[in-house]
Image: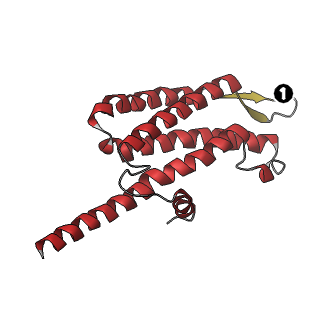
Amino acid sequence: MALESQTNQKSDIWNIAKGYVTLKVLKILVENDTIVNIAIYGYENIEESTGYTEEIITAKRIEAIRRLHTNLEKLYSNSEFTILKKELQEFQQYKDTLKVVYEALGKITKETIDQRTNIKKITIDEEHFKKCLDEMREIMREMNKQLNNANLIFPSSEETDIEKMKEELIEGG
């Protein structure tokens, strides 16, 4: 009876942990892929490529890169406590790098005013934008490795159906 109680308790803890990881870590990882596409192109998929003006695409790209930063901060906060001790110092450096990127994000846009029409136009400083995006993508790659080492992405103890997990994440479950 005591063994059965311990097994149920461990199972309950795993179910809670699995739900946490699904909502607070894996969901963000899936969202980040979509956000990166929007930051690069201004839209998520090819079908949307003709439906937006240049101004809307610019606004969506700016919003996406800022949202990516926010997501990386959330991912850091949601997973720092799970990182292996031997990798924790390196993982904590991402927080400092994200602070630097945050400051740099303030410089990704240029604002001009058309003197004839007095209309404000916002453009992206593509070189600066690319540096910020590249830095965040590098953080994503490195964080993924450490999250995986902590068994948050591909648990070593069970088989994982990647397509099923992706479906569940996209459907919100």
The one of 165 and 41 positioned closer to us in this rendering: 165
Residue 48, can we see it? yes
Could you tell me residue 133's position as x and y percent?
Answer: 60, 32
Return the residue found at the far right.
116
Return the residue found at the far top.
127
Q: Which residue is mark 1?
A: 115
The one of 11 and 172 positioned closer to us in this rendering: 11
The one of 90 and 63 positioned closer to us in this rendering: 90
Q: Residue at x 33, y 32 (%)?
A: 87
Q: Residue at x 28, y 66 (%)?
A: 11
Residue 122 in which image quadrant: top right
In this image, 31 relative to 74: left or right? Answer: right
In this image, 146 relative to 167: left or right? Answer: left
Q: Residue at x 48, y 41 (%)?
A: 72
Residue 14 in which image quadrant: bottom left
Tell me if mark 1 has few (under 14), some (14-19) or many (20+) residues whose alpha carbon lies within 10 angstroms of its own.
few
- Secondary structure category for the residue under label 1: loop
Looking at the picture, does residue 153 appear above or below residue 14? above
Return the residue found at the far left.
2
Looking at the picture, does residue 14 appear above or below residue 114? below
Q: Quadrant of the N terminus?
A: bottom left
Could you tell me residue 63's position as x and y percent?
Answer: 63, 42
Could you tell me residue 35's position as x and y percent?
Answer: 61, 45
Looking at the picture, does residue 157 appear above or below residue 84? below
Looking at the picture, does residue 98 appear above or below residue 19? above
Could you tell me residue 171's position as x and y percent?
Answer: 56, 65
In this image, 158 relative to 118: left or right? Answer: left
* Three-letter amino acid code at the position of disc 1: Gln
Residue 3 in which image quadrant: bottom left
In this image, 86 relative to 47: left or right? Answer: left
Number of residue marks: 1
The one of 142 and 164 positioned closer to us in this rendering: 164
